[in-house]
Amino acid sequence: MIRVEDLQKSYGSLRAVDGISLEVPEGELFGFLGPNGAGKTTTLSMISGLLKPDRGRVSIADIDVWTSPKEAKRILGLVPQDLALYEELSARENLTFWGSLFDLPRPQLKANIDLWLDRVGLKDRAKEPVSKFSGGMKRRLNLAIGLVHNPKVVLLDEPTVGIDPQARKNILDIIREIAREGTTILFTTHHLEEAEALCDRIAIMDHGRILETGSVEELARVAGDGSIVTVNGPFTAAQFRTALEGEKVNVLSAAEHVGTATLNPDEINVVTLLQKLSEGGIEITDVSIQKPSLESVFLKLTGRELRD
């Protein structure tokens, strides 16, 4: 349904997107997971046709986004990170304005607006100006605007940014519903729990590149089958790495006062690991142990935590 080939975009000397290629089949909920500045929004902007790439090709349902933009955008819905709302207009008026851009027959547009006002929980507030809405209500209306023409493909750029947990849950529930109905969704987030809960497949992205792609289970195997051990103490990154040199462990990250390693369960256990660190002069003040996760995968691929 979505095909991206060798997509690239630079701003001066900064390579924001560096040769991305991917395919998202019909009905899949595909996520871009990465920190702010990873290139997620720039990628989504090029896929949607809002930003022209320096190189590469994008097609949606075999329609080239740049040679046939009107045809592509009829089946595409975009929910941007920045709210696309007119504060002085009501929720219904906003939906009417944006929905009219798709040349829907008036009876169909009205039916769609009624449907989406109901689905996002704004039916009873439809006539109020958006300026009176809470942040969560505005996010739900922003979502409805991207869905008002019932697109086959939806691009969602950080749709829960800046809202409270209950409002986030409401939006994620709606995304799950439309995915179950067969809509193809491309979703960007920097929240691990959102990606794990929603996505059929995830692309881990950093510095404009896709580092790894797969399901949650497939990605977890990238970090290995053993436990992830994180230790804290008054040591340097070099000291941590030196203490484990030659041992049957994989150092995921090392920094001032904190180091993380994954164990080979057939070769070394946690007790032995801590003994090796102690023998290497590493003083430990705190230890945490976890199973392989998206966080540990990100650590292995980038050498830093996702929240950095």
Image (spheres, rainbow, N blue to C red):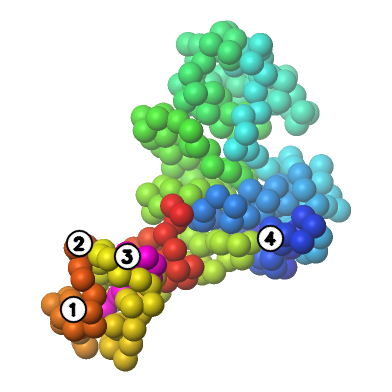
Percent position (x, y) of residue 303?
A: 45, 68
Label 1: state its secondary structure.
Answer: helix
Disc 4 marks which residue? 17
Q: Amino acid at mark 3?
A: Val
**What distance separates the C-alpha of mark 2 from that of mark 4?**
38 Å
Q: Which mark is residue 278?
A: 1
**What distance separates the C-alpha of mark 1 from that of mark 4?**
43 Å
**What distance separates the C-alpha of mark 1 from that of mark 3?**
14 Å
| Horizontal side of residue 11 vs 96, given as left or right | right
Q: What is the magenta range?
A: 254-263
Nearest the viewer among 59 and 260 is 260
Looking at the image, tell me whether mark 1 or mark 4 is earlier in sequence order: 4
261 up-or-down from 119: above or below: below
Do labels 1 and 4 touch, CB within 8 Å? Answer: no
Looking at the image, tell me whether mark 2 or mark 4 is earlier in sequence order: 4
Looking at the image, tell me whether mark 1 or mark 3 is earlier in sequence order: 3
Disc 2 marks which residue? 286
Q: Amino acid at mark 4?
A: Val
Q: Which mark is residue 258?
A: 3
Percent position (x, y) of residue 117?
A: 53, 21
Residue ID at (44%, 52%):
307
Q: Amino acid at mark 1?
A: Ser
Looking at the image, tell me whether mark 1 or mark 2 is earlier in sequence order: 1
